[in-house]
Amino acid sequence: MIPIAPSSADDRAPGRRRAVFLDRDGTLTEPRHYPADPEELVLQPGIEAPLRAFQDEGVALVVITNQSGLARGLFNEPTLSAMHDRLRELLAQHGVRLDGIYTCPHHPDGRIAHLRTTCGCRKPAPGVLRQAAADLRLDLASSEQLSIPVDHRGEPQVARSH
């Protein structure tokens, strides 16, 4: 996991919760090339146990995901919403509840004009993290980010750092 540096002293204020920020594609779900159908989302095997453990500790579970397929015109916002509903449903079957899902829809090479931009919310920029922290009263200083990079064959390369 990757510790997150706070953006301001307010991010460390008392009463804020610790969070684990999770990537969607390749971390929570098996890697797919621009999935555009809710049925294409398949949970990574065994992902539910560590998520339940975090949840039982009172840690917020927040998905942060770049979804350039929106900017590229590969799917639309209602489809993305249905996919996220499906993700919540799959996790709920294992007793896991997400506290939030935050998406960057932008890409500088996008086909959709209003989404074709370089922005501050596309990871690795901190925009979605800061938005989630503000909305959910999260303590960024004690939070971590979990993502599982995928190699050229689409195989997960599990790496965890503190």
Image (spheres, helix red, strand yellow):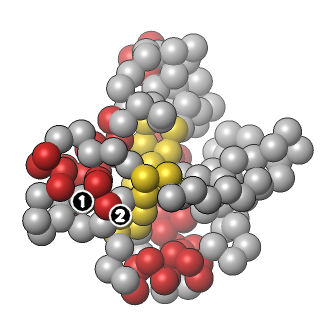
Rendered image: mark on residue 19: 2
73 or 157, nearer to the observer:
157
The structure residue drawn at horizontal position 35% and vertical position 73%, both measured from the top left corner, is 59
The disc at residue 138 is 1
Identity of the amino acid at label 1?
A: Leu
Residue at the spot 24% in from the left edge and 67% down from the top edge: 17
The single residue placed furthest to the front in the displayed view is: 162
Q: Is residue 88 left or right of residue 99?
A: right
Residue 26: percent from left, percent from top? 68, 53
- Residue name at image x 51 percent, y 58 percent: 162
Q: Secondary structure at mark 2?
A: strand
For residue 48, above or below residue 40: below
Q: Residue at x 63, y 73 (%)?
A: 47
Left or right: 48, with 62 as reference point: right
Q: Earlier in the sequence, mark 1 or mark 2?
A: 2
Look at the numbered discs 1 and 2 and tell me whether their residues touch, using CB distance below 8 Å.
Answer: yes
Task: Let me know if residue 22 appears in the view.
Answer: no
Residue 133: % across, % down: 25, 52
Residue density around tag 1, few if under 14, some if 14–19, many if 20 or more, within 10 Å: many
Decide which of 44, 75 is in the foreground and name it.
44
